Image (spheres, grey):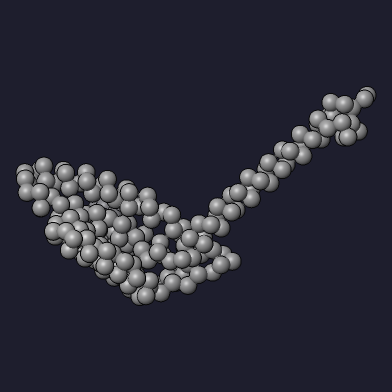
């Protein structure tokens, strides 16, 4: 009986440790995202929602004017308030929280395209499930989800969305492209040299050359 009681106490102790560890991990995940960068991610989502709402709901040309003022204003606000430093040698950014990352500007395009289709699907499911027939509510729901998804992705990954609008993000993209092209050209040059070694009569000294005399 004493052994059984000891076993039960040990099991309870282990479960308590596992539970505490789980709570600490979850708290750490949330706490690490309560930072300046993610605050501006939320602000950008709000301004993007205002811009799209104005464009889709407010009569034109006023809605379009508000959109074209709000969207560039949101991007400019992010660029002015975000704290990002860039290392051109390592091609990486350092955020206000000290996180280091390498991001190319082109990813913002598929990010918004994927967000668009996900928003259309999610809003369609919600409006169908809730039996919503108002086109205005459908548009508001779509713009809300579409505005949230890009920022939500960045919040979950814990980096500022402003990195995609930073000029050096396009420098990273160009450097990666140049690096890929350089590798491609080196590979082609290597193949060309091998081809000449085998097929050029000048290299008939090489045993693998087609003009080599044994």
Q: For the point 24% across and 54% down, which residue is it?
A: 146
Viewer can see residue 155: yes
Residue at x-position 16% and y-position 44%? 124
**Residue occupying the far front of the picture:** 61
User: Of all residues shown, which one is farthest toward the top?
Assistant: 214
Query: Which residue is painted at 26% across and 47% down in the image?
Result: 118
Q: Is residue 22 visible?
A: no
Q: Is residue 102 above or below residue 180?
A: below
- Image height check: is 2 above or below 163? above
Residue 19, compared with residue 211, is above or below; it is: below
| Camera-side residue of 12 and 46 | 46
Q: Quadrant of residue 128?
A: top left
Where is residue 145, by image quadrant?
bottom left
Where does the image place residue 6, in percent across and percent down from the top left? 28, 57
* x, y percent for residue 176: 55, 55
Q: In the shown orientation, is residue 87 left or right of residue 55?
A: right
In the rendered picture of this protein, how many numbered marks are placed on residues?
0
As drawn, 61 above or below 36: above
The x and y percentages for residue 131 are 6, 44
Q: Left or right: where does residue 129 sit relative to residue 20?
A: left
Residue 27 rendering spot, x and y as whole percentages: 29, 66
Q: Which residue occupies the foreground of this view, 206 or 12?
A: 206
* Quadrant of the rendered image containing residue 78: bottom left
Which quadrant holds the C terminus?
top right
What residue sits 81% from the left and 30% below the top? 199
């Amino acid at each position: 009986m004493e052994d059984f009681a000891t076993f039960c106490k040990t099991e309870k102790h282990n479960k308590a440790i596992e539970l505490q560890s789980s709570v600490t991990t979850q708290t750490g995940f949330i706490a690490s995202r309560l930072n300046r960068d993610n605050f501006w991610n939320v602000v950008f989502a709000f301004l993007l929602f205002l811009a799209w709402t104005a464009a889709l709901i407010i009569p034109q040309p006023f809605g379009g004017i508000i959109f074209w003022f709000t969207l560039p204003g949101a991007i400019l606000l992010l660029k002015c308030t975000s704290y990002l430093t860039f290392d051109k040698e390592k091609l990486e950014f350092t955020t206000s929280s000290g996180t280091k990352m390498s991001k190319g500007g082109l990813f913002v395009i598929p990010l918004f395209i994927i967000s668009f289709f996900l928003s259309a699907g999610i809003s369609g499911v919600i409006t169908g499930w809730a039996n919503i027939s108002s086109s205005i509510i459908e548009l508001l729901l779509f713009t809300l989800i579409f505005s949230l998804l890009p920022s939500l992705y960045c919040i979950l990954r814990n980096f500022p969305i402003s990195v995609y609008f930073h000029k050096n993000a396009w420098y990273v993209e160009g450097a990666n492209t140049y690096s890929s092209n350089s590798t491609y050209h080196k590979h082609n040059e290597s193949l060309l040299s091998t081809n000449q070694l085998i097929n050029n009569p000048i290299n008939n000294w090489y045993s693998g050359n087609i003009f080599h005399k044994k």
